[in-house]
Image: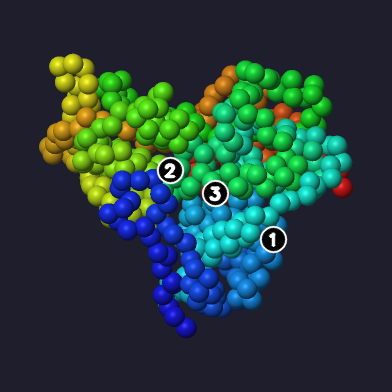
Amino acid sequence: MNKQKVLMRTLQEHLRTSCFEEVNLGYSKEEALLEADRCLDCKHQPCVAGCPVGIDIPGFIRLIKADQIEEAYHLIGLSSSLPAVCGRVCPQESQCEAVCVHAKKGESVAIGHLERYVADTYYQQNHTYEPIQSHHTKVAIVGSGPAGLSCAHDLINAGFEVDIYEALHLPGGVLSYGIPSFRLPKEIVKREIVELTQRGVKIITNVIIGKSLTIEDLKDMGYQAIFIGTGAGLPRFMNIPGEMLPGVYSANEYLTRLNLMHANNPLSATPIHRGKRVAVVGGGNVALDAARSAIRLGADVVYLVYRRGREELPARLEEVIHAEEEGVIFKLLTNVKEIIGDEKGFVKSIRCVDMVLGDLDESGRRRPIENPKKQTILPVDEVIMAIGTSPNPLLIQTVKELASDKWGCLVVDDATNETSMPSIYAGGDAVTGAATVILAMEAGRKAAHAIIQKYKPL
């Protein structure tokens, strides 16, 4: 048995930095079969327990071996509404693959790559779906990101009438506005959403709940339950001198303008500034997405400034490796203290301080401590802040009955995801703060299960 997983082919490095084409190219049939053959089909199935949405992983891999791709797709679909998305962006290495038996003496089975193979192969056949008959129990979902889509998937399959209200002009939430095409092509997101709409889910865009319509309006429209999956789109800043200078972006704005507003096109109505020397502050996947995007927009130098070391980087290892291959310079154990402007008021440089790691903090990571004797000035003309996001405060400001914590996250029941208001549920980043796609999907499924148990239209 091969202890090493079958590597996925990638776009050549010299081609990546001039385009937004997807970097990972997927498995061929032969590669998928080789990788599927590595699965031991364990009786105790630790990988299933490691999957937040409980996909029958050994089951769909057995079907790959038998070349029954349609059956494998439908088996995954019992648990996941977004297999092609999850196969690309989920941190399998810290979830299902982390507990794979193979990981004890070699490399785990490439579960994510195989999930992607199943979904991509299935979609190449251009399937259409019959609408599922509704029993006229209406549920409104606020937000069309992964939490809302996952909730809608389970509810429509259970016979509910499901309407999704989306504030933006394009559904998908963070899948559409936050993750660049080189990591998640937009046609992938679109085709998985199309499947939901063919099954009967209605998506109404350009509607802001809390402004265009209220929660009370939705109740008056006959919705018996409401799920809030509005994500965490409010960027955080460091509150350091110079953050308001022209040339400073939040990663949220930077990526949204690229992904939704086509700002990489010079003819766009809202073109984005193309810095030549760019500093991205942060160490998560969003920071890596922004840094790699800046490379593709023509930056000569891109720094990734992170206050901890490489081992503490929260970004996926695959993304870190790709960023290094593409030329991102990692300034680790470094923190930004000031953004300095030129005589015209634009970004000229950043003042940084070296960091050392101390004792473990509440997150279980070693606490970064400043070494004020070691400071440097980095010349840059653009700074992108990628240090996290919080939920948009609009709903809790307009609906006083919705309980929230000190970070602005909605408070829900652990078992059902019901909020402080009866029949109002919530999940995903609106509850946890910025987290992963798969954890948002898990929350959507949990809320859907609670709604099904309460209303049982079937």
Residue under the image location 72 percent in, 48 percent down: 154
Mark closer to the observer (3, 1)? 3
Q: Nearer the viewer, residue 20 or 407?
A: 20
Q: Residues within 10 Å of mark 3 (few under 14, many from 20)?
A: many
Mark 3 / mark 1, whichever is N-terminal: 1
> Cα distance, mark 2 to mark 3?
12 Å
Would you name the residue on which mark 2 appears?
180
Q: Which mark is residue 74?
A: 1
Quarter of the image holding residue 378?
top left
Compared to residue 46, the image places residue 433 above or below, namely above
Mark 1 / mark 2, whichever is N-terminal: 1
Compared to residue 63, the image places residue 182 above or below, namely above
Quarter of the image holding residue 11?
bottom left
> Cα distance, mark 3 to mark 1?
17 Å
28 displayed left or right of 294: right
Quarter of the image holding residue 410?
top right
Q: Amino acid at mark 3?
A: Ile
In what element is the residue under mark 2?
loop
Percent coordinates x, y for residue 57 in the rendering: 61, 66
Q: Residues within 10 Å of mark 2 (few under 14, many from 20)?
A: many
Would you name the residue on which mark 3 appears?
188
Residue under the image location 21 percent in, 41 percent down: 301
285 displayed left or right of 18: right
Q: Amino acid at mark 1?
A: His
Percent coordinates x, y for residue 432 in the rendering: 54, 39
Mark 2 / mark 3, whichever is N-terminal: 2
Residue under the image location 37 percent in, 33 percent down: 265
Q: Residues within 10 Å of mark 1 (few under 14, many from 20)?
A: some
